[in-house]
Image: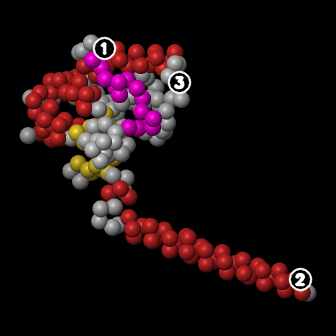
Amino acid sequence: MRWFTAVLRQAGAGLRLLIVLTVILGICYPLAVYGVSRIPGLQSNAEGSQVKLDGQVVGSRLIGVDPVAKNPAADPYFHNRASASAKGALGPADPSTSGGSNLSGDSTELRGLVLERKEAIAKREGVTPDRVPADAVTASGSGLDPDISPAYAALQAPRVARVNHLDPGAVRRVIAEHTAGRQLGVLGAPTVNVLQLNLAIKKLGAH
């Protein structure tokens, strides 16, 4: 019977440990994390950096979802970078997936995609292909990049101003106001958040 008593003792110790760890890791730890996420200044990040319009969540500052115009011939939106998850060359992307194309720099398929995107964007913006910036034709690593370069925003500005019946100068000022500089002044490159830019344009047109 000693072995049975030993088994019961070990089972009891294991059960007690299971209960203690369940309370600590299954209840206390999640509550502590939730409490930290409610600290002012952290709540926005914890909730996914949501962007709201008239009290309604319209997207996230961190997840780029390319807008789709009802009438492509009168496209009123600024557009994100291309995504490898998109069915077509330009998109829209599938926000439920994330990842690059894994195509090498010397890939014939990649070169073809870049050329196709360049021609499509040049046609959409009414410019020559050589004016299309690099970030417009290369897919982001995640496929959900929320930002574009100021150069790509500037390329789209005349179309956005024309379709939305806005002053081109006012659109350029909105782009400048929504351009974020380099991190710490030296890291990365200036960027423009597409969702916030489109919302600012919508607000400008409502005036």
Query: Which residue is under mark 3?
Result: 104
Q: Secondary structure at mark 3?
A: loop
Foreground mark, 1 or 3, reads: 3
Q: Earlier in the sequence, mark 2 or mark 3?
A: 2
Q: How far apart are labels 1 and 3 at the CA level?
A: 23 Å
Name the one closer to the observer, 114 or 57: 114
Name which residue type carries label 2.
Trp
Most extreme residue toward the top, as rendered?
128
Q: Does the image show residue 138?
A: yes
Q: Residue at x 30, y 62 (%)?
A: 41
Helix, strand or loop for disc 1: helix
The percent coordinates of residue 4 (x first, y second) are 87, 83
Q: Which residue is identified by label 1? A: 129
- Magenta region: 131-145
Residue furthest to the right in view is 1
Q: Mark number for residue 3? A: 2
Residue 201 percent coordinates (x, y): 17, 37
Say what amino acid the circle numbered 3 marks: Ser
**Distance between the Cα atoms at labels 2 and 3?**
63 Å
Q: Select label 2 or label 3 by which is in front.
A: 3
Q: Amino acid at mark 1?
A: Pro
Q: Is residue 69 above or below residue 185?
A: above
